[in-house]
């Protein structure tokens, strides 16, 4: 069995492109071109160069000595927190802005919830000199003022979504409406391994540089390319997709996906999609998502804005169904404690999303000889206020 997308855009039963008729030409143009463009030597050269000189890649694979000692195993941290703008999201937005330029697009749209993807998109639009419009729910604009300021500083226009719950899904609807009205000159940058085909595959490929680097970096220090485990937190699934990518079809590498259980899986305030989700369509693809019996999307909850998403990308739904990846849910409290612990054991303050992945060691035991690689997806600067409030620092 392959865990990569098939020609029709499916991972097993999940994926596809469930989009309004009016959007078909836009998505089809991308589908017909994305692999061809990514294979062009010029494209690859420009992408690699920007990852190196602008993003700061390769990011280090750091052996966390004190944490390894505490949990009696070998823990490596893949330092995506050291990327420009503070997280892995920039790997994807760099790829997509180059894609947009190759497709002769002059205008970029995106949607954002917490603002992290909006900032990563505004950044690459400034880099490329393209117009940037970011849709954001009115409620989120009020909650995420620093990121709104960053986007404006970078030259983006932030347009409030005023309908519905005025959060992420309403911003998504606005972005889709915009794309339908501007099919010729506009590219829509989606920020995770979600959306209609070819987005999940395209995003996974742009993020796959993470596991490509882990392979040679681990070979240098451990004498082998394959760790025993790769661990990543999952919101939509892009940092996990990148960290897993070159290991998907290597059965000796066990994959662990960590979801946000919020206040507890069954409290009604959670984002543990694999456990609570049922098959449905969200953001243009068939996947697992949290919904009521009559198919209304359930409002997710997590202390970390980046994991607060009611679905997972289709690759991850498939990894769950086939049991290729083990899914673990971590509560707000467990994540916060793990974030504080990493800060004090290793001197690295992680994003709260990432803290979820770090929290598995309390319950899950590894062997002393195991090599465990964790995707350290982002840094915690943006979360300082949440940490401070939580620990009364
Ligand atoms: C956005 C974000 C995530 C969640 O998104 P994925 O697409 O699942 O990777 C995780 N960690 C950080 C630091 C983020 O900013």
Image (spheres, helix red, strand yellow):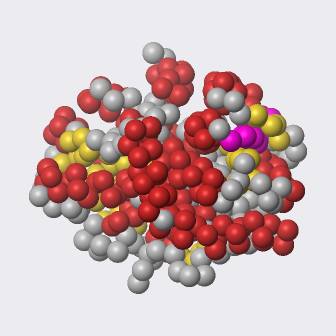
Q: Quadrant of the N terminus?
A: bottom left
Using the rendered image of the protein, determine whether residue 261 is visible from the camera's viewpoint: no
Please name the residue shown 33% across and 49% down the image: 374
Place of residue 193 in the rendered image (x, y in percent of width and height, measured from the top left): 56, 59
Compared with 214, 63 (above or below) is: above
Q: Is residue 179 magenta?
A: no
Place of residue 254 in the rendered image (x, y in percent of width and height, measured from the top left): 31, 65
Residue that extends furthest to the front in the rendered view of this protein:
42
Give residue 230's quadrant in the image: bottom left
Please name the residue shown 61% across and 70% down the image: 33
Compared with 369, 165 (above or below) is: above
Using the rendered image of the protein, determine whether residue 108 is visible from the camera's viewpoint: yes
Compared with 289, 336 (above or below) is: above
Please name the residue shown 30% across and 53% down the image: 213
Compared with 191, 351 (above or below) is: above
Give the main secondary structure, helix, strand or loop, of the magenta stretch: strand
69 and 187: which one is in front?
Answer: 187
Q: Quadrant of the C terminus?
A: top left
Place of residue 358 in the rendered image (x, y in percent of width and height, measured from the top left): 36, 43
Give residue 297's quadrant in the image: bottom right
228 and 87: which one is in front?
Answer: 87
335 and 182: which one is in front?
Answer: 182
129 and 337: which one is in front?
Answer: 129
Please name the residue shown 47% across and 58% down the image: 42
Residues drawn in magenta:
130-139
Q: Is residue 138 magenta?
A: yes
């Amino acid at each position: 069995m392959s865990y990569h997308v098939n020609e029709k855009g499916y991972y097993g039963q999940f994926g596809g492109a469930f989009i309004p008729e009016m959007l078909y030409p836009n998505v089809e143009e991308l589908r017909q071109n994305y692999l061809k463009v990514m294979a062009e030597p010029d494209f690859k050269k420009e992408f690699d160069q920007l990852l190196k000189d602008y993003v700061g890649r390769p990011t280090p694979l750091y052996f966390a000595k004190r944490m390894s000692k505490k949990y009696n195993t070998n823990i490596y941290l893949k330092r995506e927190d050291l990327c420009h703008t503070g997280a892995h999201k920039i790997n994807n937005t760099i790829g997509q802005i180059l894609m947009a330029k190759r497709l002769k697009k002059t205008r970029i749209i995106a949607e954002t919830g917490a603002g992290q993807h909006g900032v990563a998109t505004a950044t690459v639009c400034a880099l490329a000199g393209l117009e940037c419009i970011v849709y954001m729910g009115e409620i989120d604009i009020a909650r995420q003022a620093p990121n709104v300021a960053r986007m404006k500083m970078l030259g983006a226009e932030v347009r409030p979504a005023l309908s519905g719950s005025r959060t992420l899904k309403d911003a998504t609807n606005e972005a889709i409406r915009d794309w339908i009205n501007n099919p010729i000159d506009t590219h829509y940058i989606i920020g995770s391994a979600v959306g209609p085909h070819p987005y999940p595959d395209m995003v996974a490929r742009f993020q796959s540089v993470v596991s490509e680097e882990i392979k040679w970096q681990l070979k240098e220090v451990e004498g082998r390319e394959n760790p025993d485990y790769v661990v990543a937190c999952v919101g939509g699934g892009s940092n996990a997709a990148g960290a897993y990518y070159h290991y998907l079809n290597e059965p000796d590498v066990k994959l662990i996906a960590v979801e946000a259980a919020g206040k507890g899986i069954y409290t009604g305030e959670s984002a543990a999609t694999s456990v609570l989700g049922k098959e449905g369509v969200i953001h243009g693809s068939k996947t697992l998502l949290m919904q009521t019996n009559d198919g209304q999307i359930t409002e997710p909850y997590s202390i970390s804005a980046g994991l607060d998403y009611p679905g997972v990308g289709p690759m991850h739904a498939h990894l769950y169904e086939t049991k290729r990846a083990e899914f673990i849910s971590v509560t707000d409290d467990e994540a916060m404690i793990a974030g504080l612990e990493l800060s004090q054991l290793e001197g690295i303050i992680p994003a709260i999303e990432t803290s979820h992945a770090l929290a598995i060691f309390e319950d899950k035991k590894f062997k002393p000889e195991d090599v465990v690689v964790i995707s350290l997806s982002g840094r915690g600067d943006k979360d300082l206020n949440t940490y401070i409030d939580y620990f009364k620092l």
